[in-house]
Image (cartoon, helix red, strand yellow):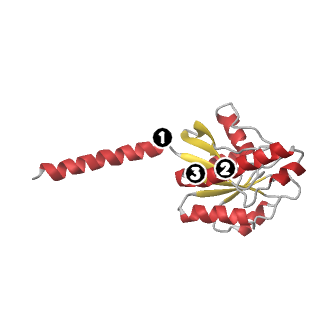
Amino acid sequence: MVGGPLKRLHNWLKSLIRSIFRRKTEVRLGLYGPTNSGKTTLANRICMDWIGEKMGKVSSIPHETREIQVKEKVTIEKGNKKLVFKLVDTPGIATKIDFEDFVKRGLKKKKAKQRAKEATKGVIEAIKWLDKMDAVLVVLDASKNPIDQVNVTILGNLEARNTPVLIVANKIDLKRANAQKVREAFPKYKVIGISAKKGSGIKNLYNELFELL
């Protein structure tokens, strides 16, 4: 009679310990945001700083990143503390993808249609991956109006999932950038102003990652 409950307790504890260690070794940190907000530039900055290699290609043409990109075992340090995670760079979220927008950017019609198709698939995949994230950096262009349908939708989806979020107000190196405006738009969230391109504010971002994760 005693063996049954004790065995169940033992198995439950083993399962709990396994799940804890599995979470520690599979922490996924996602980069989400609208197109051209600088997600891949930030991913490249983080990866170069800590593992010495880039995540992916960047471009001024929207939807350069059209597939999920993952870097394993990115380890950042703060004093004697270490934080290990999988960095997940996702395609930019958009409510509308029109091949004619790519044509206007100089792409041939056939290539523009293919890019639009791949971009649409990428957005769908990025949304599916929301359920896999342990925490998310929402990367916004601080030079643009933060009250945008895409931004609100992303944050709403993350809130519904109770996913830890840090908003990154990127591109503060631009004259028209205003990180404070982002803070005022989303007062419920911690907002860090950075320039992924120039490196401004990156050290502060790394410090905040320890709090987030």
Question: Which label sits in the foreground, 1 or 2?
Answer: 2
Q: Amino acid at mark 2?
A: Lys
| Residue located 67% across and 37% down the image | 47
Q: Position of residue 92 (x, y in %)?
A: 71, 52
Q: Earlier in the sequence, mark 3 or mark 1?
A: 1
Q: Which mark is residue 135?
A: none
Q: Amino acid at mark 1?
A: Thr
| 18 shown above or below 124 | above
Between 15 and 192, the residue placed more toward the observer is: 15
Counting other residues with Cα less than 10 Å from the Cα at mark 2, is it few (<14), some (14-19), or many (20 or more)? some
Please state which amino acid type lies under the numbered disc 3: Trp
Q: Residue at x 79, y 56 (%)?
A: 98
Residue under the image location 62 percent in, 44 percent down: 88
Residues at marks 3 and 1 touching, judged by CB atoms closer than 8 Å: no
Residue 80 place in picture, x, y as percent:
55, 38
| Foreground residue among 130 and 66 | 66
Q: Secondary structure at mark 1?
A: helix
Q: Which residue is mark 2?
A: 121
Residue 17 shows up from this direction: yes
Residue 129's mark?
A: 3
Q: Residues within 10 Å of mark 3 (few under 14, many from 20)?
A: some
Q: Position of residue 149 (x, y in %)?
A: 72, 66
Side (left or right) of 204 relative to 10? right
Residue 127 x/y as whole percent = 61, 55
- The answer for how far apart the CA atoms under marks 1 and 2 are is 29 Å
Q: In front of the other: label 3 or label 1?
A: 3
Badge 1 is on which residue? 25
- Of marks 2 and 3, the one in the foreground: 2
- Residue 211's place in the image compared with 80, above or below, is below
Question: What is the CA distance from the residue labelled 2 to the residue labelled 3?
Answer: 13 Å
Name the image quarter holding residue 73. Answer: top right
